[in-house]
Image (spheres, rainbow, N blue to C red):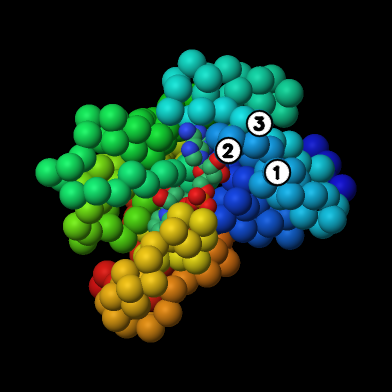
Amino acid sequence: MNDSSSRVVVITGGSKGIGRTIALRFAHEKARIVILHYDVDESASESTLKMLSQRGIGAESHKVDVSSFAAVEGIFKDILSRFQRIDVLINNAGITKDTLLMRMTEADWDAVININLKSVFNCTQNVIRSMVKQRGGKIVNISSVVGQIGNAGQANYSASKAGIMGFTKTVAREVAARGINVNAVAPGFIDTDMTAVLPEKIKETFIQQIPLGRFGQPEDVAETVYWLCSDAASYITGQVIHVSGGMYM
Ligand code: NAD
């Protein structure tokens, strides 16, 4: 079981996909894990909690819209009052609303920017004081290779993910002297619900752009995230690590 000396890890979008796999990776060290999600129902988050409990981890999950500053402020106050600290924040929640710019509505733009980018501000802003006070912490923001190279049909998504890269570098500079590492991981195409909806033809085109010749697995991303949160990566901050099979180099 987890005890009070184990790290407190908050993972947004931790109910499934990459976020769930990151949670399972932290289970190896018996971390105390808090998952935030915004799924319509609780089935995915309940499955994740069950997987964690099978590994001896008593985790918790909350349905919170991370694009709402007030909602995020509320849950972080609650977590901090109960655990007294947050050691690791993984800003992983994200959505897509893909369409060509000519057809993109204001609502498509706002939803993606708010859920993917504003959420990173909301969560980081609400955790940073406590990390500064404890003189340590690890923040990993999940960006995307398309934030670097662009992708037709993803003006909103690529802008949100490029924004995460700039935010990461700036906050890394602001808090480095306080012993806090802030990095981003930029996955390429990873096998999750997010990419399962892509038509086979599009997937085949994407695979041709991946030097390693395959989609990545959530574990590929989770290992890098976990390493960035370990002592082994303590001299690394303000970086964007691409986990994309070489799509960007
Ligand atoms: P997923 O669709 O499997 O899971 C998304 C998670 O985000 C879910 O837990 C969901 O509840 C949560 N979420 C969505 N909106 C939310 C909101 N408003 N408030 C709180 N939580 C919310 O997605 P995934 O493929 O695991 O992606 C995880 C992250 O990785 C995302 O940021 C995504 O942009 C990024 N990413 C994914 C890929 C890929 O190929 N799958 C590639 C690059 C980057």
Which numbered circle lies on residue 195?
A: none
Image quadrant containing the C terminus: bottom left
- Residue 95: x %, y % from top left: 41, 44
First in residue order: circle 3 vs circle 2: 2
Callout count: 3
Q: Is residue 151 left or right of residue 145?
A: left
Among the 4 quarters of the image, the one containing residue 14: top right
Amino acid at dot 3: His
Q: Nearer the viewer, residue 93 or 77?
A: 93
Q: Provide the residue designation for mark 3.
A: 62
Among the 4 quarters of the image, the one containing residue 38: top right
Q: At x 73% / y 23%, what residue is drawn?
A: 82
Q: Are marks 1 and 2 in contact (CB under 8 Å)?
A: yes
Q: Is residue 78 left or right of residue 148?
A: right
Q: Secondary structure at mark 2?
A: loop
Q: Provide the residue designation for mark 1.
A: 43
Q: At x 33% / y 73%, what residue is drawn?
A: 201
Q: Nearer the viewer, residue 215 or 102?
A: 102
